[in-house]
């Protein structure tokens, strides 16, 4: 029996076909893809944004980070709402507001309105990841949960890759404002498709559910009480803090400062620089599902998470502090990005660290970590760059030298070092629910 009032359906073991399950999950994943695309899009239009709005590095970092401010703020309420009301309505509303926010950003007359557009985008697409995890727990077998989490990261990184070379080509051909306007229209189409296709649980389509808890078991639980209960587990605090360093570094480099670094320090053109940062994102995407699957096979979460953290730390240290030729730097981005996919181990680990009825809230809390990393590190690196700026301008855009970038990126290494120490204190789950 799967649980709740659906025993008659569940006893038949008539689980939904894979094609249906992946299509339902996939619409949520498309919103996450769009959200990731919009998250890293400023990286390839830094010159246009700095010129058009006449802003400094710190202000550019703040413009990009407005996405993270609202995204992070929405994670806890998103998780709790997903637990109580389901992902279908969340995803539909999220896509609709994301379309409005993207349109506002596309046609913003001043930096204030551009910031407000980014704020709306971050708040709206924040529902995607937690909703995907919630859908995965109902539409997929438990052993596929880590795979679905990894595939979620892969979908997001596909959006990040689209925001690289393809976006740069489109921006050069049509301008950044029209391209963002079309992005808003496509997101509105996704809003309609989500409402028509997505269902919270297979029982709504006449199939058995894979959910292992009791349906509706959270309904009588206070929202605040559920949050307090989630926060009473030590692992949740740790697994939220660790990605601030490792994912924050990826989002800071690939999401904003990597392209100008490669252009200004290594003399690359915008498309070549965007292609190299896309290599980091693709490696990150591949590392997520593979590391999650390997930890599942090992029957342990902590050892592989720690090993991957060490590899990422060494990779970033070499990239930032050693005078590497460009080809070696690019080669190092591959294992560094791959190892940074260790956050997927953390999402599965967090799910196992709380009762199943609190999975959505726990996922929302833990998903704050990577975004807090981007939120803090992107403007912090921009601030450090401004502190080390030597006064040189190129076509109205501030030019930063290698010393300035090294100082800025040192903040990323410091965050990773602290995260690695914190991870040591997490309690192993052995890939099983620790409290059900």
Image: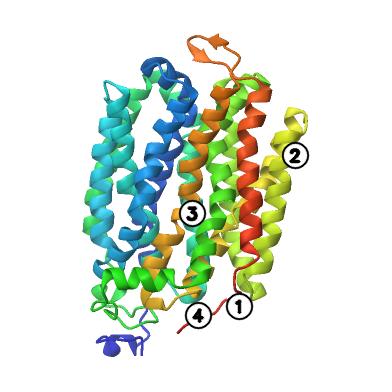
- Mark 4 and mark 1: span between their CA atoms? 9 Å
> How many C-alpha atoms fall within 10 Å of the one at disc 3: few (<14), some, or many (≥20)?
many
Q: Mark 1 points at which residue?
A: 430
Q: In this view, does 361 lie above or below 26?
A: below
Q: Name the residue under label 2.
A: 318
1 and 2 marks in contact (CB < 8 Å): no
- Mark 1 and mark 2: span between their CA atoms? 33 Å
Q: Does any portion of residue 338 appear in the rendered image?
A: no
Q: Tag 4, which secondary structure? A: loop
Q: Nearer the viewer, residue 240 or 324?
A: 240
Q: Which of marks 3 and 2 is nearer the N terminus?
A: 2
Q: Does any portion of residue 291 appear in the rendered image?
A: yes
Q: Mark 3 points at which residue?
A: 369
Q: Is residue 235 above or below residue 165?
A: below
Residue at the spot 36% in from the left edge and 77% down from the top edge: 357
Q: Which of marks 1 and 2 is nearer the N terminus?
A: 2
- Mark 2 and mark 4: span between their CA atoms? 38 Å
x and y, in percent, of residue 175 in the image: 37, 20
Q: Tag 3, which secondary structure? A: helix
Q: Earlier in the sequence, mark 4 or mark 3?
A: 3
Say the numbered circle drawn on residue 433: 4
- Mark 4 and mark 3: span between their CA atoms? 22 Å
Is label 4 or label 3 in front? 3
Residue 120 appears left or right of 346: left
């Amino acid at each position: 029996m799967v649980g709740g009032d659906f025993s008659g359906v569940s006893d038949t073991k008539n689980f939904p076909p894979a094609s249906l399950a992946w299509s339902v999950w996939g619409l949520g994943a498309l919103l996450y893809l769009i959200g990731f695309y919009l998250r890293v899009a400023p990286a390839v239009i830094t010159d246009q944004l700095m010129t058009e709005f006449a802003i400094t590095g710190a202000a550019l970092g703040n413009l990009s980070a407005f996405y993270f401010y609202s995204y992070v703020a929405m994670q806890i309420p998103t998780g709790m709402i997903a637990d109580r009301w389901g992902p279908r309505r969340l995803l539909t509303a999220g896509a609709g507001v994301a379309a409005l926010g993207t349109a506002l950003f596309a046609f913003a007359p001043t930096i204030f309105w551009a910031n407000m557009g980014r704020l709306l985008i971050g708040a709206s697409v924040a529902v995607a990841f937690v909703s995907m995890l919630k859908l995965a727990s109902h539409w997929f077998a438990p052993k596929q949960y880590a795979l679905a989490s990894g595939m979620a990261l892969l979908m997001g990184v596909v959006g990040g890759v689209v925001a690289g070379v393809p976006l740069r080509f489109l921006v050069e051909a049509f301008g950044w404002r029209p391209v963002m306007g079309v992005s808003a229209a496509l997101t509105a189409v996704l809003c309609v498709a989500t409402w028509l296709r997505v269902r919270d649980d297979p029982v709504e389509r006449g199939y058995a559910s894979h959910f292992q808890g009791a349906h509706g078991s959270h309904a009588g639980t206070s929202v605040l009480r559920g949050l307090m209960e989630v926060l009473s587990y030590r692992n949740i605090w740790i697994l939220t803090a660790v990605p601030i360093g490792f994912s924050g570094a990826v989002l800071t480099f690939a999401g904003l400062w990597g392209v100008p670094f490669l252009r200004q320090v290594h003399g690359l053109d915008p498309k070549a620089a965007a292609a190299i940062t896309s290599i980091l994102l693709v490696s990150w995407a591949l590392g997520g599902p593979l590391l999650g699957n390997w930890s599942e096979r090992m029957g342990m979460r902590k050892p592989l998470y720690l090993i991957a953290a060490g590899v990422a730390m060494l990779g970033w240290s070499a990239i930032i502090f050693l005078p590497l030729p460009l080809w070696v730097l690019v080669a190092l981005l591959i294992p560094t990005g791959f190892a940074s996919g260790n956050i997927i181990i953390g999402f599965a680990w967090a799910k196992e660290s709380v009762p199943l009825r609190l999975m959505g809230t726990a996922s929302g809390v833990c998903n704050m970590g990577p975004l807090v990393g981007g939120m803090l590190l992107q403007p912090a690196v921009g601030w450090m760059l401004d502190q080390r700026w030597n006064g040189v301008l190129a076509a109205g855009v501030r030019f930063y030298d290698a010393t300035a970038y090294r100082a800025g990126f040192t903040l990323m290494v410091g965050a990773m070092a602290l995260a690695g120490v914190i991870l040591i204190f997490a309690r192993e789950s052995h890939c099983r629910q620790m409290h059900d």
